[in-house]
Every structure is written in structure tokens, then in C-alpha cells.
């Protein structure tokens, strides 16, 4: 997966927020896997993955429905940001084992 910037996290959080609450944690993890696979595809074939974009988390998230941008005062949105960051940490931890 390409380098993760704050805009990647917030866009992914908007996609997670648009998902059903019971599915949010697994969806956050799935977005990260999609971005990783898209990055490998893009590097190998020199073009964007048709379903998941260019290998950034932002591009993978934009392939899904997005909730409106919210402030961090919104508990649900803040929780979705935490879910994305936690999923990213888990992905990087298990990937490096």
C-alpha cells in the first residue's frame, strides 16, 4: 500500500461511516487490504486496479459510498477514524511478521 496521509484516513473513515455499524470494523480492514492489493497491481501492470484504484487508501475508499465529512466532535465519525487507524496498525503489524 502506498504511503498513508491524513486525507486517506479521513476518506476511509467516511466510507466506514457509510457502512452498517455491525460491519464497520471488518470493512475498515477490508479497505486496507484492497489498497494493498491495488498497489501491487498498479506497480506490476502500470495502471490502476479497476475496482480499488491506484494503491492509496483514499482511492480504495472512494470506490465505495462515502458519508458526508464531519467534525471530530461527531462521536461516530471519530470512532470510524479510530477503526481505520487500528486496522492500519494491525495490517502493518501482521504484514511485518
Image: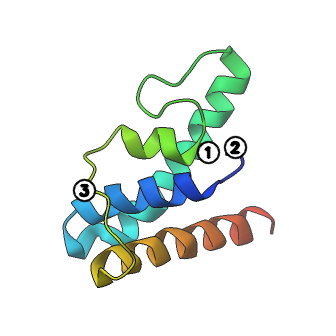
Q: CA distance from mark 1 to mark 3?
A: 23 Å
Residue under circle 1?
36
Q: Nearer the viewer, mark 1 or mark 3?
A: 3
Q: Residues within 10 Å of mark 3 (few under 14, many from 20)?
A: some
Q: CA distance from mark 2 to mark 1?
A: 8 Å
Q: Residue at x 60, y 66 (%)?
A: 88
SS class, disc 3: loop
Residue 28 screen position, x and y as percent: 43, 63
Rendered view: 41 above or below 95: above
Label ID, residue 67: 3
SS class, disc 2: loop
Q: Residues within 10 Å of mark 1 (few under 14, many from 20)?
A: many
Q: Could you tell whether 30 is left or right of 70 in the image?
A: right
List the single residue furthest toward the top.
46
Of the numbered discs 1 and 3, the one sitting upstream in the chain is 1
Residue under circle 2?
2
Q: Could you tell whether 50 is left or right of 37 in the image?
A: left
Q: Residue at x 65, y 35 (%)?
A: 39
Q: Residue at x 49, y 38 (%)?
A: 59
Marks 2/1 in contact by CB < 8 Å: the verdict is no
Query: How are the colours assigned in the image?
Result: rainbow
Quadrant of the image occupied by residue 89? bottom right
Residue 66 screen position, x and y as percent: 28, 50
Q: Residue at x 67, y 45 (%)?
A: 1
Of the numbered discs 2 and 1, the one sitting upstream in the chain is 2
Q: Nearer the viewer, mark 2 or mark 1?
A: 2
Residue 15 screen position, x and y as percent: 33, 55
Amino acid at each position: 500500500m502506498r504511503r498513508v496521509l491524513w486525507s486517506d484516513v479521513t476518506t476511509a473513515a467516511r466510507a466506514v461511516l457509510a457502512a452498517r455499524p455491525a460491519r464497520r470494523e471488518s470493512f475498515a480492514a477490508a479497505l486496507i487490504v484492497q489498497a494493498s492489493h491495488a498497489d501491487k497491481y498498479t506497480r506490476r501492470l502500470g495502471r490502476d486496479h479497476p475496482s480499488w484504484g491506484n494503491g492509496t487508501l483514499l482511492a480504495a475508499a472512494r470506490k465505495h459510498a462515502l458519508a458526508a465529512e464531519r467534525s471530530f466532535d461527531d462521536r461516530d465519525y471519530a470512532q470510524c477514524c479510530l477503526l481505520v487507524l487500528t486496522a492500519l496498525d494491525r495490517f502493518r503489524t501482521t504484514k511485518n511478521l
